[in-house]
Image (cartoon, rainbow, N blue to C red):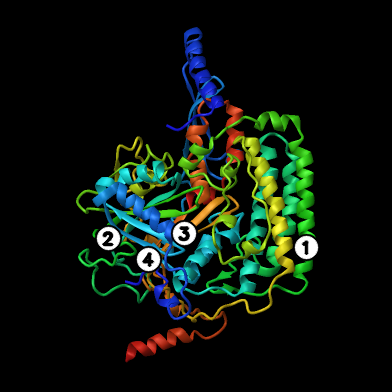
Amino acid sequence: MSRLSSAETTTEEQPAPLVDAARDEMVAALATQLGDAVVESHVAPGRDAWVRVDLSAWDTAARVCREQLGLTYFCYLSAIDWLPSPFGRSEDDSAPTVAPSTDQLDHGVAGGATRFQLLARLVSPTTHLGINLKCDLPDDGLTAPTWSRIFPGADWNEREICEMFGITFAGHPHLVNIYLPGDFEGHPLRKDFPLLSRMVKPWPGLVDVEPMPGEPDEDEEATEAGDEE
Amino acid sequence: MTAISERQQRSYIGAIAAEARVNVELETEGMTLNIGPQHPATHGTLRIIAKLDGEQVVSAEPVMGYMHRGYEKLVEVRTFPQVTTLINRIDWLGNFANEVPFILAAEQLMEIEAPARAQYIRTIFFELSRQANLMLFLGDMGVQLGAITAVFYAFRDREHVLNLMESVTGGRFHPNFDRIGGLKDDLPKGWVEECKGAMVKVRRFCDEIEELLMGNEIFETRTRGIGVIPAEVALGYGLSGANLRASGVDWDLRRDNDYPLAWKDADFKVWTHPDGDSFARYWVRLQEVRESTKIVDQLIENIPAGPIMAKVPRIIKVPAGEAWVSTENPLGEMGYYVVSKGDLGPFRVKIRTASFNNISIVPWVMRGVYVPDVITILASLYFILGDIDR
């Protein structure tokens, strides 16, 4: 897993700022406040910071960020489904031959242990530094504490996550669909939810060549010849 | 809950008092008013369910999804270069600006940077799309308040900017011009002169609209003190861009973040307004268009010579990693959280759009206002439907 760190590229040139004191300090402050609830953290110097917290401390993390670290600007709240898509990119040749399993998931920055992860970003309006918060959700209980009392803007984001990923939020005042019709079945942003338009007519992908009008259809002949072999 | 302005408090108490009084005297029941989905004030298909008590709004709830296109799902089946075609259409008035943060995120993951000439032209186009977008707002706000002339001026003068975009990219609204590693094309001959002329016209439009609307007494009384949003509330809801600056938060990503783009080479002022009302939001955007023309004027004089594309492989594979890049788009902060697994296409892209958060404050800000103010506040928060629904 390659990290966002610029360590590999900058060592041979000049000693670039590999230490990001402000972001390190921010992550450290969060770790002191939350204790063991910080599972993993990662700082890409000069770029960004990631902190993965335990589910039990998901709302505490938001409160600490807001009230003690000054990260009062709510950027967004979303989720990631780490299951590799069983459909590939729905092109003729990109579907994986082996069905993906949940045992071996390739998580991104700051790691992960489960299929679904919450992802949020909070920013400080004074220092302009932001932090990406992640949180693992166990497969058997896709429920997280709501943020809507800490950041009112999280209200709509949580409704979106609920319909798109099927993750519910305990304590949310009005957890109904925001985009989809009320009786919509399934959770579209889950990787195992097929993109129907691509199922009906798969995208030809890199071999997307159509004959010009009036020209003989070489493509068809080629495939016919290929079939005979 | 965070601090509520005095005016908000007063209007809310007023709403409750009015409700009690009316109920006692006339025993009227509350009325539900549907604004939209097909209503000129929503410029698109946004529906607002307003529960009224007489002329006052007790609660307002926006209903979205009439135009949800599922971009976050669609980008997962596309290759990186194909994504720009889609995301062009998120905020269709600020078209080019949508492409930039995604391309920057992909470039960050690939650890390449476009050449300086490309960065300059990108910045110029970014500002042009900001002007095209905000000019329409400046006119449209008048229409919402009953002054219909302004919008014709806006449509007329916006053409100058759109013509500039079209003569380079071939598209008035969907340029699809940004590439990973640079730009599709260089500027045509004579474009720089044309652009300078257009900037003069845009500035003249700003002066015109200022005289036409902002000095108008009706305009002032209908916008001053209407829809006041305090800074803490705005931050909690994630308001960004001019909406946040109109509440007195001095924060502009162009100035405060470190981008490879050329904003750092331009000298511009970030305007804020302490009031946080509809008038402030309008005023800040007007100044923003003016500053934007100044940025273009400064950059266009100093476009460095050189290539417009960095060396990138023919088939682009983005190394595994995660990157978040957001920029100060015409509507506010727009960003992409790109997760790549080293494939041809992104694994997951979270699209953070400005209008979604900007509109999420509607239930809060519309409690206790009068029905005509609903339209004023909606117009002044300024949203593009595609930017809410994605």
- Judging depth in this view, the residue of B311 and B150 nearest the camera is B311
**Hey, what amino acid is under mark 2?**
Gly
Determine if marks 1 and 4 fall on one subunit: yes
- Judging depth in this view, the residue of B129 and B5 nearest the camera is B5
- The residue beneath circle 3 is B336
- The residue beneath circle 4 is B347
- The residue beneath circle 1 is B196
Foreground disc of the pair 3, 2: 2
Q: Position of residue B97 (x, y in %)?
A: 58, 59
The chain carrying label 1 is: B
**Hey, what amino acid is under mark 4?**
Phe
Q: Residue furthest top?
A: B25
Residue A112, labelled with which disc? 2
Q: Position of residue B101 (x, y in %)?
A: 52, 62
Q: Are marks 3 and 4 in contact (CB under 8 Å)?
A: no
Foreground disc of the pair 1, 4: 1
**Hey, what amino acid is under mark 1?**
Lys
